[in-house]
Image: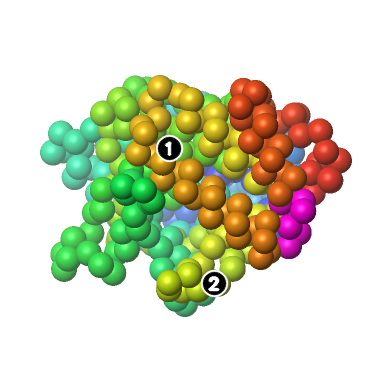
Amino acid sequence: MKVCAIVVTYNPNIDVLARMLASLSLQVPHIVIVDNGSSNKAAVFALASDVIHMHPLERNFGIARAHNQGIERARELDAQAVLLMDQDSVPAHDMVQNLTNSLSTLMAKGERVSAVGACYFGTEEDNESFFVRFGLLRFKRQYCSECEIGETLVPADFLISSGSLIPMSTIDGVGEMDERLFIDHVDTDWFLRAAHSGFQAYGDCRALMEHGLGERTLKIWIGRTRHVPQHRPFRYYYIYRNSILLYRRSYAPLKWVINDVWRLVGIGLLYTIFCAPRYQNFKMMLAGIRDGFLGKTGREIIATSVALKAES
């Protein structure tokens, strides 16, 4: 299976990016870097090689546009599948091989596979990754450590985009990423559409990847130790706005809507009561709720200078 990796960059840590590319270059024949107008793009472009292809965008058009640009380039390279990677994700030396083996096995059985995703881990030793299923009220976490002996593939209702291996045939059936969402829930939207069309996602416990969620990770205790991502305030605008936009779409199942509402309640309580900057977080959440109900999309709709300054 010919795999093309798509890496989206926006002001990346060059050392981490170089580590990722060094590992990926030994695992895939082509890597397409789509740069979203980084201030350090000269350092990013210096990493180009025969394997690593650069695709610069003049400004930040968001993760969805970047993914779609990368997919278009992957088609030109005759890729049979694309591997989506964030700029701060570093794959294990055999991650791609494990993903392609699992995907090939599933497809050979006649499964309609949306994607096979890597099991990611953070920098903290006790930060164990999990895959997600829809619960009665809240998302259910499926940890690889809880799987039966010999079980390596875990059905999931959606995956994070980074570390997801997606067949081109599935993209042909489901469509590309929704650029109107700009950032946040782009992967959720795509997987909900895929599931609505009869495709199933899987997590691969053998495919390992180092990955960070959010600008930093908080370690808190709520019934048990949890690691939760903390973002800059402007991100909560997109999280809340895009959730509400997705609630109104016909392919979003009620079960996911209920699960996600509880998630937003938890985020709201945590980052407006316990985690600074509380007021800015609260302001962005309210703006996101407002614009979600108004049906606004895209990037240039945050009117507050605080949010725009935080993004830049």
Which of 100/127 is in front? Answer: 127
Vertical placement of residue 138 versus 210, above or below: above
From the viewer's perspective, is 183 left or right of 44?
A: left
Q: Residue at x 75, y 45 (%)?
A: 283
Q: Residue furthest left?
A: 109
Q: Is residue 149 visible?
A: yes
Left or right, 204 with reference to 86: left
From mark 1 to mark 2, how far is it between C-alphas?
A: 25 Å
Task: Pick whichever, 49 or 138, lies toward us.
Answer: 138
Residue at the spot of label 2: 220
The amino acid pointed to by label 1 is Val
- Please report the residue visible at 71 percent of the width from the left and 51 percent of the height from the top: 281
Q: Residue furthest bottom?
A: 125
Q: Which element carries disc 2, helix, strand or loop?
A: strand
Ranked by sequence position, the earlier of labels 1 and 2 is: 2
Give the dominant element type of the magenta stretch: helix, strand or loop. Answer: helix
Count of numbered badges drawn on the protein: 2
In percent of the image, x 79 and y 44: which residue is there?
A: 307
Q: Which mark is residue 272?
A: none
Is 51 or 63 nearer to us in this picture?
A: 63
Residue beneath disc 1: 257
The answer to which quarter of the image holds residue 147 is bottom left
Do residues under tags 1 and 2 come within 8 Å of each other at their CB atoms? no
Secondary structure of the residue carrying tag 1 is helix
Residue 140 at x, y percent in the picture: 34, 54
On the image, the x and y values in percent for residue 49 come to 59, 47
Q: What residue is at 54 percent from the left and 50 percent from the top?
A: 265
| Residue bounds of the magenta highlight | 276-281
Query: Taking 174 as reference, is 66 above or below it?
Result: below
- Residue 119, quarter of the rendered image: bottom left
Residue 169 at x, y percent in the picture: 32, 27
Which residue occupies the foreground of this view, 280 or 53?
A: 280
